[in-house]
Image: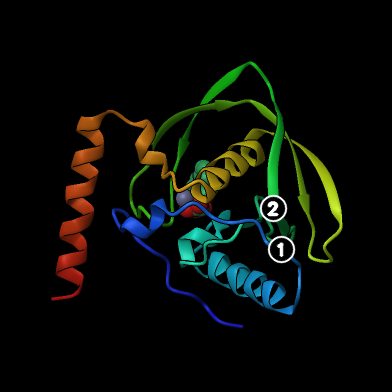
Amino acid sequence: MAVLPILCYPDPRLHTVAKPVPQVDGTVQALVANMFETMYAANGIGLAATQVNVHQRVITIDVSEERDQPLVLINPEIVWSSPDTQVNDEGCLSVPGIYDGVARASSVRVTALNLDGQPHTLEASGLLAVCIQHEMDHLLGKVFVEYLSPLKRNRIKTKMAKAQREATR
Ligand code: K1U
Ligand code: ZN
């Protein structure tokens, strides 16, 4: 297993639209293992394959306190969203140090394949629903800062670009 490098906003590769996984094989299972290692090492509650520069519809999540309830969503689709929304503070491993409020559906129903390639359906609310929607956006090439005002987004973009320049100096 390996900890993979995470792309940082405003890297244009974060805007790539991920393709469906044609078959859940050993390569996909190895990707999932590496994504969990990367997500846990970064203290994240979720990770989309897009963030490690793999443009396939794969998500790993663990919102448990004990970090012992891993959830894999391969080819996930949101098949129902509640009409009521809630604003929650979100963070992103690709935008380190930035947290801001985003309105999301309070509950969602998701279909996906598991690590054995079997279809399953999941109903989620609370932090899990927020995290699923955040990660699904990554697979569509969308980063949560795109929900913020252009002023905030541009400030974040400038701050991130500067931090990356200084890190590579
Ligand atoms: O996709 C990512 O970049 C992971 C991201 C997921 C996420 C967190 C919070 C709301 C929505 C989506 C993170 O894990 S950010 C870092 C974090 O550790 C965290 C933030 C808030 C609550 C719990 C954890
Ligand atoms: Zn994110």
Percent position (x, y) of residue 164? 21, 65
Residue visible at 26% across and 38% down in the picture: 153
From the viewer's perspective, tell me whether residue 46 is left or right of residue 15: right
Check the image and name the residue furthest to the top. 84
- Return the residue at label 1: 22
Which amino acid type is shown beneath numbered disc 2? Asn
Residue visible at 40% across and 51% down in the picture: 15
Instruction: Pick the residue in front: 89 or 66.
Output: 89
Percent position (x, y) of residue 143? 41, 45
Q: Which mark is residue 75?
A: 2
When asked about the image quadrant of residue 78, the answer is top right
From the viewer's perspective, tell me whether residue 57 is left or right of residue 92: right
Percent position (x, y) of residue 63? 65, 50
> 10 Å neighbourhood of mark 2: few (<14), some, or many (≥20)?
many
Percent position (x, y) of residue 20? 65, 56
Instruction: Pick the residue in front: 92 or 110.
Output: 110
When asked about the image quadrant of residue 107, the answer is top right
- Evaluate if marks 2 and 1 touch, with contact meaning CB atoms under 8 Å apart: no
Helix, strand or loop for disc 2: strand
Measured in 3D between alpha carbons, the distance from the residue under mark 2 to the one under mark 1, in whole angstroms, is 9 Å
Helix, strand or loop for disc 1: loop
